């Protein structure tokens, strides 16, 4: 039973354009949401997070949107750069599930020069 | 501030052996979580330790165990290794609340032959 889903295994965009990565979750108890970027054989790098009391959070080129009624979050990267090419994971946390992040399957982002 | 460190980075073992992996968290962080990443199952939560106590555990067999020391450093142990235990093992540290961001180490690549 996948509680967090990233339905797009891959995404290809042109440099300078917007990249939009999507994530759906099923558990209403989740109240904290994060995006990580990962290269093969390395640990995930934290990008941005949002709590359930907000619907948007921005950090530089990265913006995360949360739609609680739809149980959907998205990550926007503007403008996209070739160095953004990596696997992006959404992750959720919440309630009393201490220390546990539930991850989506990841989306491979490729930004072409 | 130094990041999360994991040792060793690479390990090759044979079936039936046991292995111990080590994780040093970011200074001041009291929570350490462990994850397993495989191509088929993605990133899965193993367990979390806070102040030397296991607070949360994922759905892994008892062959997977861990502990945390008074300086917050953590070890995980896998006994009676199976081929399917080949994976990237990641640890992450945080301050300890469910809404605190987890920061990941580089991982230990375990290969079981």
Image: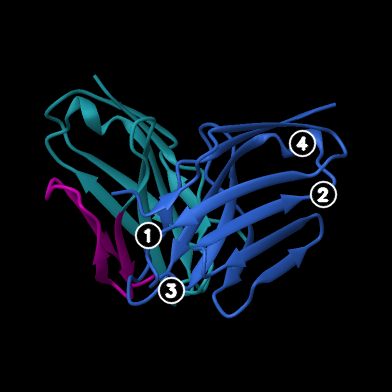
Which subunit holds the residue at mark 4?
A
Closer to us: B83 or A61? A61
Q: Which residues are magenta?
A: B46-71
Give the CA separation, mark 4 to mark 1: 28 Å
Residue A21 image label: none
Residue at numbered disc 1: B33
Tell me the quarter of the image containing the C terminus of chain B: top left
Tell me the quarter of the image containing the N terminus of chain B: bottom right
Residue A83 image label: 4
Which subunit holds the residue at mark 3?
B
Mark 2 against mark 4, which lies toward the viewer?
Answer: 2
Which subunit holds the residue at mark 1?
B
Q: Colour of chain A?
A: blue
Residue at numbered disc 2: A78
| Secondary structure type for disc 2 | loop
The residue at the point 81 percent across, 60 percent down is A60
Position in image of residue B74 (x %, y %)? 34, 59
How many dots with numbers? Answer: 4
Give the CA separation, mark 2 to mark 4: 13 Å
């Amino acid at each position: 039973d996948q509680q967090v889903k990233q339905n797009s295994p891959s995404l290809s965009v042109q440099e300078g354009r917007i990249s939009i990565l999507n994530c759906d979750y099923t558990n209403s108890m989740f109240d904290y949401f994060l995006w990580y970027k990962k290269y093969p054989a390395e640990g995930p790098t934290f990008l941005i997070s949002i709590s359930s009391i907000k619907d948007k959070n921005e950090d530089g080129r990265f913006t995360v949107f949360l739609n609680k009624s739809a149980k959907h979050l998205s990550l926007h990267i503007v403008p996209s750069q070739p160095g953004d090419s990596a696997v992006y994971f959404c992750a959720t946390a919440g309630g009393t599930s201490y220390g546990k992040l539930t991850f989506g399957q990841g989306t491979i982002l490729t930004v072409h020069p | 501030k130094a990041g999360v460190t994991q040792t060793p980075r690479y390990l090759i073992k044979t079936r039936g052996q046991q292995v111990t992996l080590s994780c040093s968290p970011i200074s001041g962080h009291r929570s350490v979580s462990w994850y397993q990443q495989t191509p088929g199952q993605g990133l899965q939560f193993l367990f979390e330790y806070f102040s030397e106590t296991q607070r949360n555990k994922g759905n892994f067999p008892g062959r997977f165990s861990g502990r945390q020391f008074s300086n917050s450093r953590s070890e995980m142990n896998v006994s009676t290794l199976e081929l399917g235990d080949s994976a990237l093992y990641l640890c992450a540290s945080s301050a300890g609340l469910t809404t605190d961001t987890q920061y990941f180490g580089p991982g230990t690549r375990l290969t079981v032959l």
